[in-house]
Amino acid sequence: MAAKKAKPRGLGRGLSALMADVTQEPEGRSVSEPRRPDMTVPIEKLHANPNQPRRTFSREQLDELAASVKEKGIIQPLIVREISEGDYEIVAGERRWRAAQMAQLHNIPVIVRDFDDTEVLEVAIIENIQRADLNAVEEAAGYKQLMDRFGHTQEKLAEALGKSRSHIANLLRLLSLPMDVQHFVVEGKLSGGHARALVTAENPTDLAKTVIRDGLSVRATEALVKKQHQPEAEKSAPRSRNLDAGKDADTRALEKDLSAILAMKVVINHKAGTETGQVVLTYENLDQLDDLCAKLSR
């Protein structure tokens, strides 16, 4: 008999379990009161998740966390799963584990959950996006993993994670930047805002180096990218003005109607004596472009 086809997974038990264990407080318990762990485990019996999406840990932040752990202990238990008798893999809380090592703790409080390999990866990605201070490229990579490996759409992720769809879409565009520009973001040399401004640049690597060298703001970076496209726009401007002068009232009315519907400037350039022409849409920012793509894909 043919095997039954597996049902597509939603955000899955991983997300619900993580949210229940890490973000939700049991009824009647104070938020400031430490969550009761299942047990304490010797620190050498805990192992990092090899598929942990977070690859960089700020030394300064770890030092601060280690000082807090040394003084107050670990208030929030780690979420783990047993991988062999007495040995556990960290599902959520690797930063606390690293800080505990620096603070020379011998035992760590844990909550044990029965996750399979797929759920561990899904939970690890979501835990990082929800609770850790990821840089923009790491956050984008997390979204891409959730979409590629688990089939989640931008709309589903936005709804489940409390983000806007445009936020997710704009971050995913960063992954189209050259790797050296992405590394500048990971290293903290460029902010996510700088990187978003460089997505449409013709030579993002060269411009990124200029931004870093001159310490340009995000606005200045956007102006630099816009200036890069300016000569071509100036060449086409006189032609557009001439075309505008010869447009009939119906064409102008249609431009206004489309502009109102799409919430962006629409220019119709019809070639006289033919049935062909151009419709030119002008967006002012990436959010507008994202909204346009959403409308066209429906």
Image: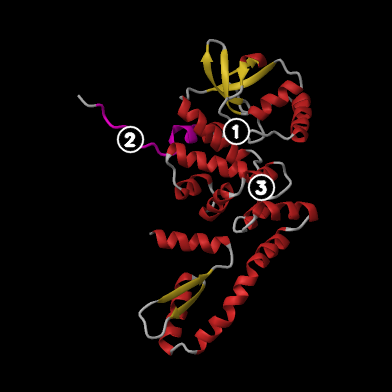
Residue 290 image point, x, y percent: 51, 59
Q: Residue at x 44, y 43 (%)?
A: 152
Q: Residue at x 42, y 41 (%)?
A: 151
* Amino acid type assigned to the residue bearing label 1 in the image: Arg
Q: Quadrant of the N terminus?
A: top left
- Which residues are the magenta region? 3-17
Q: Nearer the viewer, residue 249 or 79?
A: 249
Give me the C-alpha separation between circle 3 and circle 2. 39 Å
- Magenta-span inclusion, residue 16: yes
**Residue 29: numbered disc:** 1
Neighbour tally class for label 1: few under 14, some 14-19, many 20 plus, Cα within 10 Å: few
Give me the C-alpha separation between circle 2 and circle 1. 37 Å
**Residue 6: numbered disc:** none
- Which residue is outermost to the top? 85
Name the secondary structure under disc 3.
Answer: helix
* Tag nearer the camera, 3 or 1: 3
Magenta part, dominant SS: loop
Q: Residue at x 62, y 14 (%)?
A: 45
* Tag nearer the camera, 2 or 1: 2
Q: Which residue is mark 2?
A: 7
Residue 186 image point, x, y percent: 68, 42
* Amino acid type assigned to the residue bearing label 2 in the image: Lys
